[in-house]
Image (tube, coloured by chain):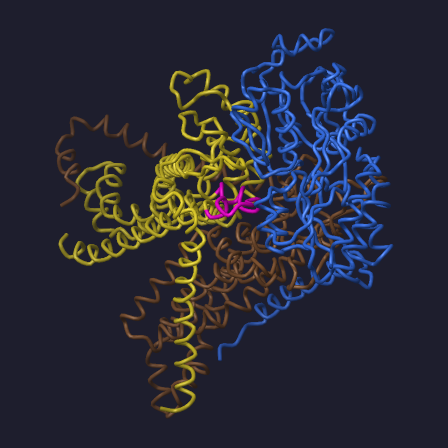
Amino acid sequence: MSAHGITRAGLQAVNLPRRRVVNRVMQALSTLAAAIAVAALVIIVYAVAKRGAGALDLNLLTKDPANSFSFGPAVKEGLANAFVGSLILVGLATAMTLPIGLLVAIYLVEYAKPSIRAGVTLVLDVLNGVPAIVIGIFVYGLIVVGSGQSGWAGAFALACLMLPLLARSTMEVLLLVPSSLREASLGLGIPRWRTILSIVLPQTLGGVVTGTVLAVARVAGETAPLLFTSSLVGTKTSWDPFHALQSVPVAIFELSEQPDPAAHERAWAAALVLLLFILFSSLTARWFATRSRRKLTAAR
Amino acid sequence: MPKYGKLTRIGLLAAVAAVLAILAAGTAGAAPAKKTGTTIAGAGSTFVQPLVQQWISPVGSAYGYELQYSGVGSGAGIAAITARTVDFGASDAPMTPDQFTACKGCVQIPWALSATAVIYNLPGTKNLLHINGATLAKIFMGQITQWDDPAIAKLNKNVNLPSTKIATVHRSDNSGTTFNFTDYLSSASASWKSQIGNGVAVSWPNGTGQRGSAGVAAGVAQTPGGIGYVDVAYALHNHLSYFAVQNRSGKFATPGLKGILAAASSDQKPDASNALSIVNPPKKFPLAYPISTYTYVIVPTSTPKAADIRKFLFWAVTKGQTYGPKLLFQPIPKPVLIVAEKTIKKIGS
Amino acid sequence: MRFGDLSLQVVAGAAAAGTTILVGLIVWKVVDGALPSIRHYGLKFVWTNAWIPVTGHELYGAASFLFGTAVTSLIALALAAPLSLGIAIYLTELAPNFLRGPVTALIETLAAVPSVVIGLWGILVLGPVLRTDVEPKLHSAFGFIPLFGEPSSTGSSMFTAIIVLTFMILPIVSSITRELFLGVPHDQKEGALALGSTHWEMVHGVMFPYARGGIAAALILGLGRALGEAIAVTQVIGGVTGSSGIQWNLFATGDTLASKIAASYQGATTNLQISSLIYLGLILLVFSLFVNFLAQVIVRRVARKQGFGAARV
């Protein structure tokens, strides 16, 4: 038995007062640790909320950044180009990843031999472990050199980050679908492909939505890959993915290094919006997940 | 098929509506876009960024071009134009022969002229303290560590210098401003030249690195005792104190238009690659500010937008110069302008 | 076989194959990009302590960045480990029921904060506080230890980066550890308590050994997170100066592999500099993959052991 300390100590009632003190101290330390973690989080979120809320107004979403060296009266400015750009980049990335992620998950769960499943799962884990900045270097070397930066390049980099998350979460939900459902469907004469697409996959819709939203929340705040693929931008809002698009995390990054307190305010406000978006998405996704998981397991 | 409850459907609808609302707001509010013509995108020097940003609106109204500029540092600008990621690059450091080879048929054109201010943050003191090159070199080499050091005090006899520690701030990215500053230090101090040298990036013996001129300005503004180097426009815009630097004739010159013009008179003949060096001008230019520099635009001779870029660059070196003086960019002198225009004509040939 | 079945299988298989090719492509592109520097320096690059981009005197080496990565990640891990364990113990054993949900949610929220926002907070809030209050006090109290040397001038330092990284590792390690602790069989815990051990002795004697493997995996995953973090670190670490990259003072500026790449990549102009930066990326990639692999191995071993362990006890 691994807990020899207990048996010995248990027989030594003499040491009891000291052991109780140690116990109390450790309990206090654990509570302290939790308090520190909560305090850290509260400090950070409070800073973002307080400073961000002060600078948050509709202008942030509707006006483009002004030229930083303009003379004359202060112009109302915002980060419209960043918000629109982020929307497009993340949207395109999701559009790229979703079908591939679904197909990979379908292949691994429905078709692959155990050895291939293990192998490709390992590949997905490796992809998950590649640091975002290395993905940035990769996409830069693959697409940007020679053709220039573009929204497509940025979206592709984000898609590489989303793929393992999506594929894994879809796999998990696919595995939850009872095999009896598949067998019943095949028994009725429905072709395999139809079974997968029309019977099995719809059961996983909740899980897929959850996985997608979580993956989106994850890449919405990614800066490193976009630095190399979609960062040389102007101030006008653009919808064109064939040129570089500004994005919220890159805007925050650039603003954080400016000397101008007004720039810092805009950074906090953008950080607040970003944080709210990520939190809202994560919470919704998790709520959705518990709900659909309950449904799925109830269906068994 | 699982049915989704009313609450869920309303929630999803609300989410989609919110997204569409953001899209609508962003498009509608964000500058009613003119029927845009060509986009001319450039990247590079943060030194020239204040001036180029002034050009965006007039160039738009004159020719309908949408001018875009990202201040990412001279090094990044050269890298970007070499990779043809942008239409033009901007650098304060003239390109090396290797960079010209890598750029494959690029030309370098001097298109603006200004100065590097040495900024400082010393509460309790006023603007325009005196300094000279040798002392600056010692400060940035770490040999002088406090503001009340005798070397500094000697130059500022009527000033009560506090004993604050000196905190040097330099550029962490490849920067033409670094090139200009280290070029000056190499010229003013033999030990700097031998130990550290000049370049767009050097091995700084101490201090913090910041990205972009804005970053250095931020670093100095937030650090009591800080000292750094930025394009003089940044010093003015952020209300930072800067030094009056002693030139070769012994006078303490400020980075104003007169000082820059005097420095520019010391070299009016661009070399084969159109580079000019006007740091630490000789004694016979008593008004010269010794850390002045030209800054260059780099364009490939064969580019699909040749005609538009030629128009833009002609405008920049002529009409565009009139936007400079407010930001302490001295309009480029005639001899240099002639060379610039000749080179611009080569684009697209 | 019907056409529909064949098509779906082929298309899905192609997606899986494509993913594998993608990973191969990433590795190949990184190696290919680093080749000029690898050919120039060979393995010497790894222990050369220099980064001189001056034209004509170019010399590059990874040593100071490896040092920075090691120091920041390991110290952050050392700080985060006891904190995470403490949090996990608190949440599973000590917290009153009504607090468990909210506190868990709060800590998971910390994981959701993007690194650029933590970096923003680091530059504008944490840095100044460290510079004006914390570092001078630590220096005057513990200055005899070389770790607590000259306080930083601008608030950007390895110390700031360490604190930022600790906050980023914390949620990962604590949430995994918490799940592990929740999985400790009740009868083992109650058995120990019944024998007269105090609560802490039960935690120390039963829960820790049971969850040992999982905790190791969690720590390694946290390490992986810290290794790859480029943005928040580059915002607060200040950049290496000259050859001062390898030194003891935590309050000095520094650089990690990831933060150096983030800071210098856009502006690299010579072939040698670009490929040296990619070489740094290659080293980072190798480390990250190894760390990931290690975590997987441990997880698999633990899973196998748990299968037997329960029966044995």
Colour of chain A, in one word, is brown
- Residue B321: percent from left, percent from top: 83, 41
**Along the viewing direction, whichever of A241 and C29 lies nearer the viewer:** C29
Residue sitting nearer the eye, C280 or A263: C280
What residue span does the magenta drawing correspond to? C259-275
Q: Is residue C138 left or right of residue C269?
A: left
Question: Visible in this render: residue B81?
Answer: yes
Considering only vertical position in the picture, is A13 above or below B49? above
Query: Which of the chains is blue?
Result: B
Q: Quadrant of residue B171?
A: top right
Q: Main secondary structure of the magenta part?
A: helix
Residue at (77% x, 20% y) in the render: B253
Q: Which chain is yellow?
A: C
User: Can you say whether C14 is above or below B282 in the image?
Assistant: below
Query: Magenta includes C268?
Result: yes
Residue B275 in the image, given as x and y percentages of width and height: 69, 39
